[in-house]
Image (tube, grey):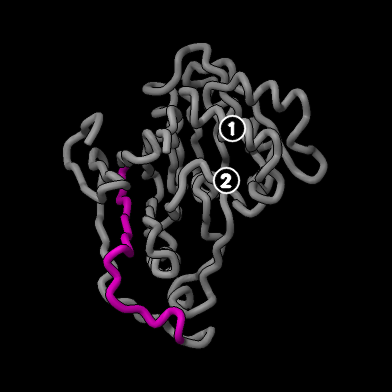
Amino acid sequence: MNKPKGTLIALGGGGDDVLLKLIHSEHCHGKAAIEVITTAAPEPHESGLAYVEAFEELGQPNVRYMHIDEENEADQPDYLHRIKNADVIFFTGGDQRRILKFLKDTQVHKLMKERYMHEDLIIAGTSAGSAAMSDRMIYEGYGPYSLEKGRTKTSAGLSFIKKVYIDTHFTERGRFGRLSIAVSQHPEYIGIGLGEETGVIIREGNLVEVFGIGVVTIIDGAEIKYSNIHEVAPGLPIAVEHLVMHLLVEGHQYCLKNKKIKYEPAKVF
């Protein structure tokens, strides 16, 4: 399978200055076109205006936002034109289910995927905007209850990357259980848990580099020796043997394909 030419940047939520500065300093030229997608946000227009102002303060003047929902369909000629010419597409936080409901499989979504595969497009997001990036996403699962069968809920995602679960606010909201269960249900997937103000840059659909002040948790189910997940009744706790976990901080890298960690920044494995 061809490697995507684009780059994914996912933040775990919380203060997003580190993400905006990263986009500005390392991944944008002065005239870069930035499109902010506010579909997930509970107050989309306020959120959109705030991000436009934040990027402008960093010296990025070419920033616009678009809100796609039941009243503003995705496949408007203006939106398609803007996505076609964007250098950066940024998904805000909020409710990731709204992103899927109003964007998945639209022409705008297909154009994003096509450009991500074949062009140097940056797709970034925070919180819900990060969780929706993969082909599957977690949208529900609370604390210790997430370790009971049926409590952790997943659905299809935007499929910019495959065989990965990205979970956000990971340490702050006690989401280890739900990511562990999601990976245990689909052990071919790698779980990436992002702490707040912490994120990953994913290049070529493979090389994951950590940035920010906190910890990124990697959960790998490929070596699971036993699980009762398909045997117990809904509502009962789940047992798993030999679920592998790694804790990474800024500068550490993880290769999704060969599951190796590097402790010094490098371009390739």
Q: Which mark is residue 112?
A: 1
Picture layout, residue 188 above or below residue 75: below
- Specify the quadrant that holds the C terminus: top left
Q: Is residue 5 left or right of residue 72?
A: left
Residue 64: x and y in percent read 64, 24
Residue drawn at the location 47% of the way across and 21% of the way down:
58
Residue drawn at the location 53% of the way across and 84% of the way down:
234
Residue 254: x and y in percent read 27, 45
Picture layout, residue 184 above or below residue 79: below
Residue 188: x and y in percent read 38, 60
Picture layout, residue 169 above or below residue 197: below
Residue span colored magenta: 212-231
Residue 80: x and y in percent read 70, 26
Q: Secondary structure at mark 1?
A: helix
- The reply to whether discs 1 and 2 touch (Cβ–Cβ < 8 Å) is yes
- Residue at mark 2: 158
Q: Amino acid at mark 2?
A: Leu
Magenta stretch containing residue 219, yes or no? Answer: yes
Picture layout, residue 124 above or below residue 99: above
The secondary structure that most of the magenta stretch takes on is loop
Residue drawn at the location 70% of the way across and 39% of the way down:
106
- Specify the quadrant that holds the N terminus: top left
The residues bearing labels 1 and 2 have C-alpha atoms spaced at a distance of 10 Å
Q: Secondary structure at mark 2?
A: loop
Q: Amino acid at mark 1?
A: Met
